[in-house]
Image (cartoon, rainbow, N blue to C red):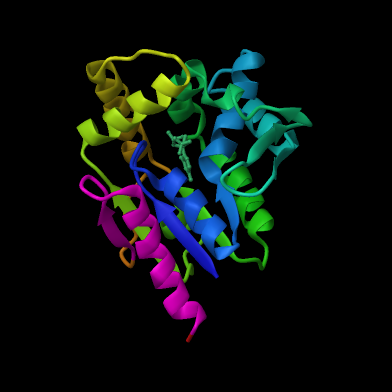
Amino acid sequence: MIIAIDGPAGSGKSSTAKAVAAKLGFTYLDTGAMYRVVTLKSLRNSLSANDFPALKQLTDSTKITFTGAPPAIKVWMDGEDVTDAIRSDEVTKNVSDYCAPTVVRESLVDQQRAIAGNTNVVCDGRDIGTVVFQNAELKFFMIASVEARARRRQKDFEKLGVTKSIDELMKDLEVRDHKDSTRANSPLCKAADAEEIDTTGLSFDQQVEYIVAKANAILNK
Ligand code: DC
């Protein structure tokens, strides 16, 4: 079974997807992490997001792997643990530019389908229900107000000892949402058959339980 969870940055989809995968014993596939790896490596190599031939070469030749069980997943780039490095401010600010080129998306979508194989997967991203796994048995599109999302991000940063204002975080989210939803290739959008979940007023446990119950209803049929 494939459970696709899409939505804008900070909507809670990654933490929800991880918890759902842990509860169901499914594999968790974080596609955003893959775009972040390509961004990190491109920045380290001073590669422009417009240099499509070089980006294609880099994306095709980078070995991206995941280890561990959700929620403690580690992300590896050519054998280097980049779990924390891909969450840096610099990567976050640039990822919407590096994830847009078709050469990057085609390569990573192929890799995402190969990783999922025929296993039970919870996969989160922006184009999972619309492009990557159009036949997913369950599709969700998680949304929340920009302010609620910025507050969640602020808490994440606090855990890292970093102070950020809500205004700055809201601005960053809006810029990224705009780029992600207006790009030509596989923009962020809700699949026609996806169920929208507004997490603004929901607790984390409620979000997780809602999806787990839907999955169990299919699994126990
Ligand atoms: O989920 P995230 O914030 O880690 O994703 C990082 C970026 O990657 C996000 O700004 C858009 C892009 N992305 C994408 O284009 N398609 C996906 N399936 C997942 C992420």
Looking at the image, is 157 positioned above or below residue 103?
Answer: above
Residue drawn 33% across the image and 63% down it: 194
Q: Quadrant of residue 77?
A: top right
Residue 52 in sight: no
Residue drawn 58% across the image and 50% down it: 29
Q: Quadrant of residue 184?
A: top left
Q: Is residue 91 left or right of residue 205?
A: right
What x and y, as percent, mark residue 98?
51, 28
Looking at the image, is 27 positioned above or below residue 83?
Answer: below
Residue drawn 21% across the image and 31% down it: 147
What x and y, as percent, mark residue 110?
63, 52
Q: Is residue 205 left or right of residue 40?
A: left
Q: Could you tell me which quadrant the N terminus lies in?
A: bottom right
Q: Quadrant of residue 68?
A: top right
| Magenta segment boundaries in residue numbering | 194-220
What x and y, as percent, mark residue 31?
54, 44
What x and y, as percent, mark residue 172?
32, 22
Residue 153 in sight: yes
Question: Looking at the image, which is closer to me, 132 or 183?
Answer: 132
